[in-house]
Amino acid sequence: MYCGYITKLSNIRAMPNADRLNLADCFGNQIIVSKNHTEDELGVYFPVDGQLSEEFCEANDLVRRKNPDGTDGGGYLDPNKRNIRALKLRGERSDGLWLPISCFEYLDKHSFDFKEGDQITSINGKEICKKYIPKHKTLGQFHGNSKKKKKKYNFVFPEHIDTPQLAYSLSSFKNGDRITITEKLEGTSHRSALVPVKATSWWRKLLRLPEKVEWKDVCGSRRVLIEEEKPNDGFYGTSNFRLEVHKKIKPFLMKNMEVFAEIVGWPGEGMAPLMGEVDTTCLKNKEFTRDYGKTMVFNYGCDEGKFDFYVYRICLLDDDGDVAVEFSTEQIQDYCKKCGWKYVPILYKGFIKDAEEVEKLAQEYCDGESTLAHHWREGCVIRRDNKADKFDVYKQKNFAFKMMRGLATENMKTEGLSEDIIEEMS
């Protein structure tokens, strides 16, 4: 879930070629702030990919506006989107937005007391921020009805957990933790499982007979169930590629097993890639654009029109649908090898001394070219392997990807799609 973080700035320093601006660090990210802020000052940090409320923006004069004579009147956020993006100003990166605590003075400040580490989305019932979801023209190839009532199913098919950002979770790591760092792949989430389906009828109830249990293999995206008999079109215009992945997974599913994977490449012939194409010129780095071209396609080694999948999690469920057993990194690798599946690329394995070492390793493996193809990587995922009873993972994306991804998201056509389908683009 997206939120703002109450925090203080660190490492404030002068910004080159800017008389009224400074550079500062916040959760390991470089941001640009005005000269009148200090490291002891409490404020709120809004990460990339968030949207600020209209009321909050108006109270703090954050939205771009024009004077009657046509000159700039102040503000810098888009008046319709009000979204936080990674950007560059005079050659310096700004990865998020920090504002002093005084930005909340338009509210009843006597009814709350902020402390460093607090997380906020609303105050006194008034929205402050939320995840940014772009709205554009209706996607021509989408034929689903976002208002259609969801069908209720009599089985449990757990969704994948929301992976927290590493920068906000460093305190979770301790001396001696064993970690695995894998490449974060950008495609679309997939899950397959073999679950018990409970069947009942009026006559079984009348005779007080127990419910009949049958085993059913099911698949879906991160939020949406895909029915083999009636596959929905989804955001990509087809679910056939998901069903193809499911066909490769289901012969190896044990009872109560659930497999999570990332599908990369293209959903089909003649269709746009799952990630979409990104413009490298937004980075204003001629060397980068020369190496990768003006347009970057995240194909992960797939031929155009083809797709592949990489498993990143396997678990066993109990009778209530809760996770009973989490496969370790080694167990997932062994099972993938046995089944002929691919596992997400491993970048590092080892023991760490403290959270600072985790942060350094994440920075080291976050940037760079993908291990699977000649394009930039999205970032990395860090898993604590010593938490055997929990899938304990954290993510970190690199700045270049966030800038390119931000522009790609702006060009997505999402109006008319349900929130479940939009989740697949995140």
Image (cartoon, rainbow, N blue to C red):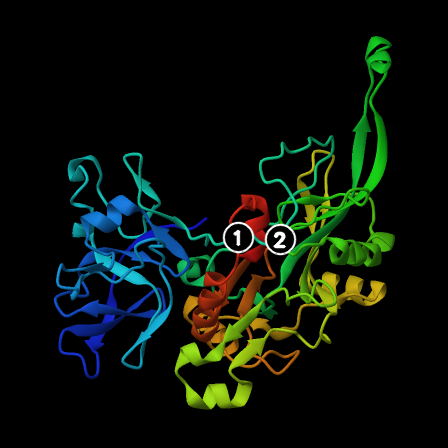
Residue that badge 1 annotates:
414
Q: Is residue 80 above or below residue 322?
A: below
Residue furthest to the top in view is: 206
Q: Nearer the viewer, residue 235 or 254?
A: 235
Please tell me the numbered disc located at residue 313: none
Asked whether the viewer can see residue 392, the reply is: no
Q: Is residue 110 above or below residue 228?
A: above
Residue at position x 83%, y 12% in the image: 208
Q: Earlier in the sequence, mark 2 or mark 1?
A: 2
Query: Residue 64: where, in percent of width, then height?
Result: 24, 60
Residue that badge 2 annotates:
235
Q: Is residue 331 above or below residue 399?
A: above
Query: Residue 274: where, in percent of width, then height?
Result: 63, 64
In the rendered structure, the answer to whether residue 360 lies left or right of residue 40 reads: right
Q: Are marks 2 and 1 in contact (CB under 8 Å)?
A: yes
Q: Amino acid at mark 1?
A: Thr
SS under mark 1: loop
Number of on-image labels: 2
Q: Is residue 141 above or below residue 360?
A: above
Q: Nearer the viewer, residue 172 or 160?
A: 160
Q: Quadrant of residue 48?
A: bottom left
Residue at position x 16%, y 45% in the image: 105
Residue furthest to the front in view is: 69
Query: Residue 82: where, in percent of width, then height?
Result: 33, 55
Asked whether the viewer can see residue 132, the reply is: yes
SS under mark 2: loop
